[in-house]
């Protein structure tokens, strides 16, 4: 690694005209902002089809025809929302591929061929996802219920695959593999080794769980608000209850798994990116028996104990990293702590949900899952999960700085040297603000289209309930 | 044929398909902006595809192929022309989102307007950059850039009008299709008169000009004789020949910029396997989309 880093340093010193510090920061902020926007949409793009399929599966399997109609209606509404969000996600993803070149030409010029194949695979998976989403939406009344359900499966699988392929590129930026640098030139490219770099498994699993949590909790939040409204109006709406239960349960199942995977991720970073780890945990000095610091608390020796199962193990601190190679520690530590804290709140709410259902099943406390305090907390889980995801993503991205490719290429070497990048940032911010407002307004309007009428029980009534909505899907 | 040649062929193919289908979508947006009749707008909206702007897939394909197969060329073009390309990207955002928004929320009046304006802005910017790259110019604000932007937008409008005649006959009434025929005749004649002197002024010396001019002239004849399906083919040929001529003119040094064979091998295998899945599923979607009546239970 060190010879490679030296070469990169030499290249940086002799490099071409550089962007001004203001433009450089603007490029980083624009990338962070547009990617942060896209991440939320992409999460919903992965999660919402999965929720739709869960609801449709329940609708096909349940013997209760009223319930089946409610499930079918939920499935239709979710996929319709998924269609709109998919369209916005597709264009916000297109912006990112432009920005790869307009903001980071140095990165693309030198390393585009190393990780490019992953994007080709991602593009194919994305196209498959788009096609089957179309088949699923159009096929609702044109295919048998069973065949229709099966056409939804490729949407979910391709969504997971395309997210994973994109993520291999970010993993590669953290753990670059699959090439050699000879006199500053990239040779011996092995695209598969680049794709399956050591950081890929942990990052992919961490991101997929996070996206399922974000989507599950965001959708659950919407229905939690609906349930609170019902309660004030003295209504009891099965539609809102089932609409809450499915996505919240998905988030609740992922929350404990995410804690385990998060632990794996921290250990991986500690072993492979000591500067990022030192920044996350606020470790300034290399020493034996590191204390664990969280916010204002400090527990002696705990960090060494947790990480190495040895209270006196030596852990590297920021002072082991050359000054020029250190990430901005405060940002990394704060965002890491925000992620952990929100993750713990979500875990606690998930545990309460599981307990309430267990008690309810045993015939006690039938109203337990629908307590107002819980619904109020649940209404905030969508925001919490999204903030946790952005914070986690900030941790890994800012923690990698000052490198765009860890140990090999500095972010400054990659940026477009053209003047005026900051004006691009301002315009992008304005356009995305309008886009966000419009997306929310459209989704709210879709929600306010006539409340679903639960049809009278009839044995074959899985479809009529939502017939009226089919037209608007087209 | 080297791997780099094959990659270039795929990129040109992707660009051609993007121009012929995505370009027609842009042009349809332009007609949507200028046409005053509800039934014409309905035809345009229906013809533009189901869910989202699927034709941008071709643009993404071209970009990914270029940065994988010819990374330095991608980096040079994108960084030098970051202003018009960023505008094009934002235009794609505005178009793609207002396209679905106006379907989900038909009462909002400014969605169609933003859709129409961004349908003109985006091909203008992309065409300006393409022309500057092809002629070896420096800026999209140069005369060549201006010319290329207007020409590309006009080509898109022409293509859209040609395609929409048949759609209007299928989806609306004969008057609507006559109006699109009128648009096609007018824009076809205008774009031909605009393209030929421009090509001469830019110093294009390629037999592809003759091909484009011949196909364009034949299209006008076919339009007059109301051969609406054949004119789709000749109209498309007239437009795509302009792109090929520009590509020929660009004369980029590809061998020096090409990625290593190991990279391109993986990409080709991925595309082959992907194609085996994509083609049949796309065909299925198309069949479902064409089937107008819902399954009766």
Image (cartoon, rainbow, N blue to C red):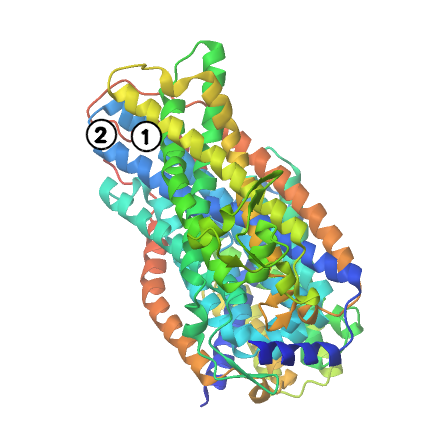
- Numbered disc 2: secondary structure: loop
Q: Is residue A167 left or right of residue A245?
A: right
Describe the element under mark 1 as helix, strand or loop: helix
Subunit of label 1: A
What's the distance in space between the residues labelled 2 and 1, CA to CA?
9 Å
Query: Residue A396, relative to residue A84: is it above or below?
Result: below
Which x, y percent locates residue A319?
65, 61
In depth, the one of A129 and A386 nearer the eye is A386
Return the chain for callout 2. A
Rendering coords of residue A223 (x, y %): 45, 26
User: Looking at the image, do the residues carrying marks 2 and 1 touch, with CB atoms under 8 Å apart?
Assistant: yes
Quick one: quadrant of the N terminus of chain B? bottom left
**Quarter of the image with the C terminus of chain B in it:** top left
- Decide: few, some or many residues near mark 2? Use Cα within 10 Å; few <14, some 14-19, many ≥20: few
**Residue B44 in view (yes/no):** no
Q: Depth check: B283 or B181 in front?
A: B283
Q: Name the residue rendered at 28%, 15% in the picture.
A: A364
- Viewer-proximal residue, B249 or B256? B256
Q: For residue A398, which quarter of the picture?
A: bottom right
Q: Give neighbour class at mark 1: few <14, some 14-19, many 20+ (Cα, 10 Å).
A: many
Q: Which residue is mark 1?
A: A71
| Left or right, residue A179 beside residue B33 | left
Give residue A225's position: percent from left, percent from top: 50, 23
Query: Mark 2 — residue?
Result: A62
């Amino acid at each position: 690694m060190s010879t490679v880093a030296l070469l990169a340093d030499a290249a940086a010193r002799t490099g071409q005209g550089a962007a001004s510090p203001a433009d450089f920061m603007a490029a980083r902020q624009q990338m962070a902002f547009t990617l942060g926007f896209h991440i939320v949409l992409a999460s919903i793009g992965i999660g919402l089809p999965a929720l739709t399929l869960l609801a449709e599966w329940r609708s096909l399997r349940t013997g209760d025809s009223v319930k089946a109609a409610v499930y079918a209606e939920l499935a239709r509404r979710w996929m319709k929302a998924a269609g709109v969000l998919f369209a916005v996600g597709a264009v916000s993803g297109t912006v990112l591929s432009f920005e790869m070149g307009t903001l980071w030409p140095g990165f693309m010029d030198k390393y585009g061929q190393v990780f490019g194949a992953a994007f080709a695979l991602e593009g194919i998976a994305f196209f498959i996802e788009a096609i089957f989403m179309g088949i699923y939406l159009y096929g609702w009344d044109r295919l048998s219920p069973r065949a229709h359900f099966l056409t939804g499966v490729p949407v979910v699988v391709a969504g997971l695959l395309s997210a994973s392929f994109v993520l291999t590129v970010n993993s590669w930026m953290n753990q670059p593999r699959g090439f050699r640098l000879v006199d500053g030139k990239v040779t011996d490219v092995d695209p598969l080794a680049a794709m399956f770099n050591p950081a890929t498994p942990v990052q992919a699993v961490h991101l997929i769980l996070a996206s399922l949590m974000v989507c599950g909790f965001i959708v659950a939040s919407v229905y939690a608000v609906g349930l609170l409204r019902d309660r004030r109006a003295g209504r009891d709406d099965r539609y809102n209850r089932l609409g809450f239960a499915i996505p919240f349960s998905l988030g609740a199942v992922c929350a404990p798994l995410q804690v385990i995977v998060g632990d794996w991720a921290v250990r991986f970073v500690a072993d492979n990116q000591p500067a990022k780890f030192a920044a996350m945990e606020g470790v300034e000095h290399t020493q034996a028996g590191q204390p664990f610091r969280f916010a204002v608390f400090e527990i002696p020796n705990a960090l060494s104990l947790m990480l190495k199962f040895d209270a006196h193990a030596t852990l590297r601190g920021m002072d082991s990293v050359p000054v020029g190679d250190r990430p901005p520690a405060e940002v990394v530590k704060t965002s890491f702590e925000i992620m952990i804290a929100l993750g713990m709140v979500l875990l606690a709410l998930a545990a309460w949900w599981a307990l309430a259902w267990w008690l309810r099943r045993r015939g006690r406390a039938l109203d337990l899952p629908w307590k107002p305090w819980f619904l109020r907390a649940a209404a905030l889980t969508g925001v919490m999960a999204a903030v946790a995801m952005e914070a986690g993503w900030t941790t890994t991205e800012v923690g990698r700085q000052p490198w765009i490719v860890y140990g090999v290429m500095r972010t400054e070497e990659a940026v477009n040297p053209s003047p005026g990048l900051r004006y691009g940032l301002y315009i992008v911010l304005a356009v995305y603000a309008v886009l966000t407002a419009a997306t929310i307004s459209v989704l709210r309007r879709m929600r306010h289209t006539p409340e679903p009428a639960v049809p009278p029980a009839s044995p074959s009534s899985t479809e009529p309930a939502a017939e009226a909505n089919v037209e608007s899907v087209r | 044929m080297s791997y780099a040649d094959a990659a270039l062929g795929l990129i040109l193919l992707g660009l051609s398909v993007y121009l012929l289908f995505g370009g027609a979508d842009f042009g349809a947006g332009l007609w949507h902006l200028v046409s005053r009749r509800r039934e014409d707008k309905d035809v345009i909206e229906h013809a533009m595809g189901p869910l989202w702007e699927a034709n941008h897939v071709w643009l993404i394909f071209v970009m990914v192929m270029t940065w994988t197969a010819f990374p330095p060329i991608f980096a040079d073009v994108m960084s030098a022309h970051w202003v018009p390309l960023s505008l094009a990207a934002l235009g794609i955002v505005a178009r793609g989102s207002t396209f679905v928004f106006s379907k989900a929320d038909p009462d909002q009046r400014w969605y169609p307007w933003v859709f129409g304006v961004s349908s003109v802005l985006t091909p203008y910017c992309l065409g300006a950059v393409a022309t500057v790259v092809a002629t070896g110019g420096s800026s999209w604000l140069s005369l060549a850039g201006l010319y290329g932007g207007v020409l590309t937008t006009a080509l898109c409008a022409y293509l859209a009008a040609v395609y929409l005649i048949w759609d209007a006959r299928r989806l609306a009434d004969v008057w609507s299709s006559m109006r699109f025929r009128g648009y096609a005749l007018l824009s076809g004649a205008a774009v031909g008169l605009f393209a030929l002197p421009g090509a001469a002024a830019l110093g294009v010396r390629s037999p592809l000009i003759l091909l484009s001019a011949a196909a364009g002239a034949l299209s006008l004849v076919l339009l007059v004789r109301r051969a609406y399906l054949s004119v789709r083919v000749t109209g498309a040929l007239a437009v795509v020949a302009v792109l090929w001529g520009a590509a020929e003119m660009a004369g980029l040094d590809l061998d020096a910029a090409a990625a290593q064979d190991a990279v391109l091998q993986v990409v080709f295998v991925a595309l082959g396997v992907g194609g085996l899945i994509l083609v049949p599923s796309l065909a299925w979607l198309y069949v479902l989309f064409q089937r107008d009546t819902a399954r009766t239970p």
